Image: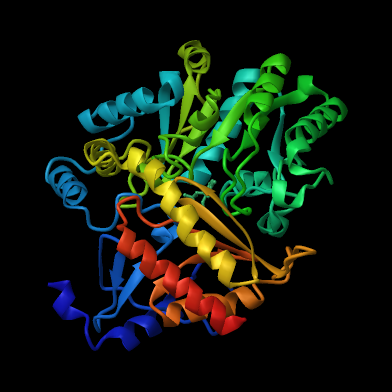
């Protein structure tokens, strides 16, 4: 097996990677690669038998854990039937997955799905659908957001990653969304919702709401800072959108499929958007898959109007088989409910880090989606690593300390993202928290 083939070849594989692979979001010189041989549950294993705790589910996608037998078997079975047909043919796995998605969508109101290969393509297509459906051009998104790395999705992304592709696509306007720990509106947390909605209305007034096709939002902001909106905000945005004929698009690429303790984070506030974009957890990353779910009126519009879009791999059978198996796993193992229940343990365990380390400024999250915000000074809340364009700074050192303890955590700027597989045991949570505890002490 491959497990036997790899030991002794780590150096060769790391070297080949360094010479032949362009790796994401990095200047390549000096990059070090840990070779992974196989994975199981919450752990990655190196060829020489090191066991690394995957405390962020990869890039917050491996929700059902690694190497789940049911998903592996579904992929294997599909590979023996048909792995590719054009999107114009029908397959059982694509039809059933679309049906299941509609069933678990907020209030079952999103009735049709366009399948893509990932999250960026999903947002790219949602921009297009919104423009075709409304006949309007502008799209709004939060400064605190990430929507993907293709040109349109990256322009939509508010955070600094966007700057590399400017001027990007036309018609994208950014605005500020609630951030109770560091209010961009300079108000106390209890006034954040009201201030944020007023700000959005002001932006719309100056942009002309009649020109705006859609407002894109991550219901819980992911890599832009793990920010949970205060109650009332998303409902307020829904109301603003409805009043102005603007489509509300929720990017649930990171938050979807149980991550926050609901199928979709929108359900925490009983909000039904016009579209949801998804990826990651739909297959737990086993095979690349994403998509756009849409409301009945949008779906109907395309009954009589051509949808000017398509992808060779739209509804790829192998990906849909993996997706269908994932949805079955979520239901059979009650993982969405489990993520909701684990919120208490996550808050309690991560909260203990705040007691022990002055560098921990804030601990926040929902379900099994948590962020630890690090500060240089608790009183002033000065960020431990400034929100800037210069690079990861001290975060790199902290991630190195975690890696030395065989704990993988996704970290950016001054945030650690704790999002273990929804199957992670309490003992595994303790192991991860203990790794963070010790790594924080090392960099203090
Ligand atoms: N949207 C959000 C909220 C994300 O977190 C990501 C990726 O991390 C994307 C979109 C882009 O997805 P992908 O990397 O699959 O293109």
Image label count: 0
Percent from the top left, x then y, of residue 444? 62, 81
31 in relation to 329, above or below: below
Q: Quadrant of residue 163?
A: bottom right
How did the renderer colour the structure? rainbow
Q: Residue at x 40, y 34 (%)?
A: 263
Percent from the top left, x then y, of residue 443? 59, 82
**Position of 421 compared to 211: left or right?**
left
Nearer to us in this view, 413 or 136: 413
192 in relation to 441, above or below: above
Q: Quadrant of residue 95?
A: top left
Q: Residue furthest right?
A: 206
Nearer to us in this view, 200 or 4: 200
Percent from the top left, x then y, of residue 155? 68, 47
Position of the N terminus, as image quadrant, is bottom left
Percent from the top left, x then y, of residue 106? 45, 24
Q: Is residue 28 visible?
A: no
**Position of 90 compared to 432: left or right?**
left
Q: Quadrant of residue 332?
A: top left
Q: Is residue 440 visible?
A: yes
**Position of 394 compared to 293: left or right?**
right
Nearer to us in this view, 377 or 395: 377
Q: Residue at x 47, y 56 (%)?
A: 348
Q: Residue at x 29, y 40 (%)?
A: 323
428 in relation to 175, above or below: below
Q: Residue at x 74, y 67 (%)?
A: 386
């Amino acid at each position: 097996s491959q497990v036997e083939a790899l030991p002794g070849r780590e150096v060769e594989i790391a070297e080949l990677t360094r010479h032949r692979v362009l790796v994401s979001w990095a200047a390549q010189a000096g990059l070090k690669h840990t070779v992974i041989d196989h994975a199981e549950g919450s752990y990655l294993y190196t060829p020489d038998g090191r066991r690394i705790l995957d405390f962020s589910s990869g890039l917050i996608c491996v929700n059902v854990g690694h190497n789940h037998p049911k998903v592996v078997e579904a992929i294997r079975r599909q590979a023996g039937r048909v792995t590719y047909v054009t999107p114009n043919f029908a397959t059982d796995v694509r039809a059933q997955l679309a049906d299941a998605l509609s069933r678990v969508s907020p209030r079952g109101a999103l009735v049709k799905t366009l399948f893509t290969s990932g999250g960026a393509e999903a947002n790219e297509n949602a921009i297009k659908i919104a423009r075709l459906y409304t006949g309007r051009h502008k799209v709004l998104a939060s400064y605190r957001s990430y929507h993907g790395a293709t040109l349109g999705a990256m322009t939509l992304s508010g955070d600094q990653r966007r700057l590399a592709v400017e001027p990007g696509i036309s018609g994208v306007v950014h605005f500020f969304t609630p951030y109770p720990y560091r209010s961009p509106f300079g108000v106390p947390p209890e006034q954040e919702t009201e201030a944020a909605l007023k700000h959005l209305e002001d932006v719309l007034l100056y942009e002309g709401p009649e020109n705006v096709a859609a407002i894109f939002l991550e219901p819980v902001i992911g890599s832009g800072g793990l920010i949970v909106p205060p109650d009332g905000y998303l409902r307020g945005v829904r109301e603003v959108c409805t009043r102005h004929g603007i489509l509300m698009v929720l990017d649930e690429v990171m938050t979807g499929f149980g991550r926050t303790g609901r199928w979709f984070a929108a359900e925490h506030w009983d909000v039904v958007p016009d579209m949801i974009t998804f990826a990651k957890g739909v297959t737990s990353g086993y095979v690349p898959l994403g998509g756009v779910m849409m409301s009945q009126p949008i779906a109907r519009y395309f009954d009589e109007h051509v949808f000017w879009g398509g992808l060779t791999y739209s509804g790829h059978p192998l990906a849909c088989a993996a997706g269908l198996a994932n949805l079955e796993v979520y239901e059979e193992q009650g993982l969405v409910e489990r993520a909701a229940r684990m919120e208490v343990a996550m808050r309690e365990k991560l909260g203990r880090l705040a007691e022990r380390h002055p560098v921990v400024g804030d601990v926040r999250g929902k379900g099994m989606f948590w962020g630890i915000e690090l500060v240089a000074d608790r009183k002033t809340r000065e960020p431990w690593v400034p929100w800037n364009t210069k690079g990861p700074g001290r975060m790199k050192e902290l991630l190195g300390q975690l890696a030395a303890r065989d704990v993988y955590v996704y970290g950016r700027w001054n945030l650690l993202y704790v999002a273990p597989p929804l199957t992670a045991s309490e003992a595994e949570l303790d192991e991860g928290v203990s790794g963070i505890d010790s790594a924080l002490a090392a960099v203090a």
